[in-house]
Amino acid sequence: MAQLFNILKITVGKESLRARVLVNPGMPLRTSENIEATARVYYLAPAIAKHLCLGDAGSEFQECMGDTELAHLLEHVTVEIMNETGLAGQVSCGRTRPVVGDERLFDIELSCPDDALTVGSLSSATFMMDWAFLHPEAPAPDFAGTVAALRKLVLSLRGEDEGATEGEPEAAEGAQDASVADEVAEEPAPVDEGPIETETVGVAQDEDEPEPRRRFADRFRIRPKMGAAPAKRVADIEPVFGGAAADVQDAGEESAE
């Protein structure tokens, strides 16, 4: 089955994780090449629109979402999945850099409070973008269900459960402000053409806003979550699905057998 991305290498540092990502040949490089697919991603995770993204296009990701690198969109979806689990700490961060010499190669750097959480979020984000750009006829991924399933997985790897973390907000709810920032890495940055954009602080969501089609800037607010400081853990995590997406995945596995 065709895929948008090929994750070539993952490097885990003290505070961050770096993924070398190839946008596969034949796939679009920029969101403007398929704005309908970009909109599908947006409707799955609308909070990405209010991620602060300090670049030429404006201060928020919504200002460049319609014409940016697919790898940059992947970064923001990954950060939002991490954020929504409530296990990523006070700041969920990311940075996307093009690699010199290959227009299809990018380094995505992510804050990494927990290896399983970060890799699981990245893997799940690639699945969601594959659906949006390549398989929109399939059932849409259940974003909230995916977040809940990933949260459950990470807690189980830590030897915890929901009963032991009652003081934390639920994965699908949140009430505290937090940050989404780009400049996280403590390792030397690879030689490249510089960061595409930089994310920083988001603002609280206004629940009373109506849902008709409007400009991104008028519609969305980030809803960060807080979680206990997790232990570092090295893990190779497959995509984590919830809801209808989980049913489709299970059916695919049975047919493969």
Image (tube, rainbow, N blue to C red):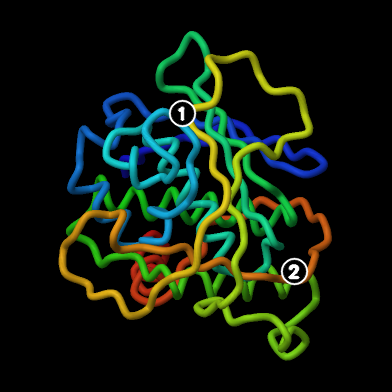
Q: Is residue 10 above or below residue 106?
A: below
Query: In the picture provided, is 27 more to the left or to the right than 231?
Result: left
Q: Is residue 177 above or below residue 136?
A: below
Please, what secondary structure does the residue beneath circle 1 have?
strand
Q: Which residue is mark 2?
A: 157
Disc 2 residue type (three-letter): Leu
Query: Would you identify the image quadrant in which residue 83 lies?
Result: bottom right
Task: Please tell me which residue lies in front, 66 or 124.
Answer: 66
Mark number displayed over residue 191 = none
Query: In the picture provided, is 48 more to the left or to the right than 210?
Result: right
What residue sits 45% from the left and 75% below the top? 145
In the rendered image, the quadrant that contains the N terminus is top left
Task: Please tell me which residue lies in front, 138 or 38.
Answer: 38
Q: Which residue is mark 1?
A: 22
Please, what secondary structure does the residue beneath circle 2 have?
helix
**Outermost residue toward the top?**
101
Residue 144, image x, y percentages: 44, 73
Q: Is residue 99 above or below residue 152?
A: above
Numbered label tally? 2
What residue sits 68% from the left and 67% below the top? 87
What residue sits 69% from the left and 85% below the top? 162
In the rendered image, the quadrant that contains the C terminus is bottom left
